[in-house]
Amino acid sequence: MAGFSLGHGAPGALSEFSAKVYEVLSRYTAFPWPVMAAQCRRLKLDPANLSAASLQQAAGLLSEGVARFTSPEKGQAVAEELRALMRSS
């Protein structure tokens, strides 16, 4: 797996797919890593090593987490982008 170094509190290395999820979240919230980490861990998923299958489980919680701290519109945009990401994988 390729490692990606990202800011905003993200760990030093994310899988390529997790980095894509992080990028989506970072467009809609100032705290993408805390949202990603908290919601994935609720499902016992490793946020640094997501796959399309694990994102399918977490997508709803991720979009709800963004909506809770920003706006329902941003949460909906996250949901749409994550669905597109899953389809493209």
Image (cartoon, rainbow, N blue to C red):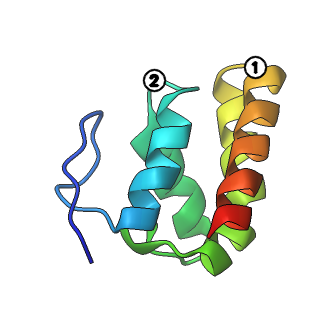
**Label 2, on which residue?**
30
Image quadrant where one finds the N terminus: bottom left
Q: Specify the amino acid type for callout 1.
A: Ser
Residue at position x 52%, y 44% from top?
35
Q: Is residue 85 visible?
A: yes
**Which image quarter holds the C terminus?**
bottom right
Residue 83 in the image, given as x and y percentages of width and height: 76, 55
Give above or below for 13 relative to 32.
Answer: below
Cβ atoms at labels 1 and 2 below 8 Å apart: no
Pick out the residue farthest to the front: 88
Residue 47 position (above or below residue 67): below
Which residue is at a point 79% across and 43% down the rendered structure image?
80
Residue 26 position within the rendered picture, expressed as x and y whole percent measured from the top left: 47, 33
Viewer-proximal residue, 11 or 89? 89
Q: Which residue is mark 1?
A: 71
Residue type, mark 2 in image: Ala
Residue 2, by quadrant, is bottom left
Q: Residues within 10 Å of mark 2 (few under 14, many from 20)?
A: some
In the displayed structure, does residue 78 sit left or right of residue 42?
A: right
Q: Residue 8 in the image: state x and y as whole percent.
A: 30, 33
The answer to whether any part of residue 58 appears in the image is no
Q: Earlier in the sequence, mark 1 or mark 2?
A: 2
For this rendering, which residue is in front, 55 or 36? Answer: 55
| 48 left or right of 27 in image | left
Secondary structure, mark 1, is loop
In percent of the image, x 45 and y 41: which residue is there? 23
| Number of on-image labels | 2
Q: Residue at left 27%, top 40%?
A: 9
| Disc 2, SS | loop
In this view, 85 is above or below 79: below
Q: Quadrant of residue 55?
A: bottom right
Which label number is shown at residue 38? none
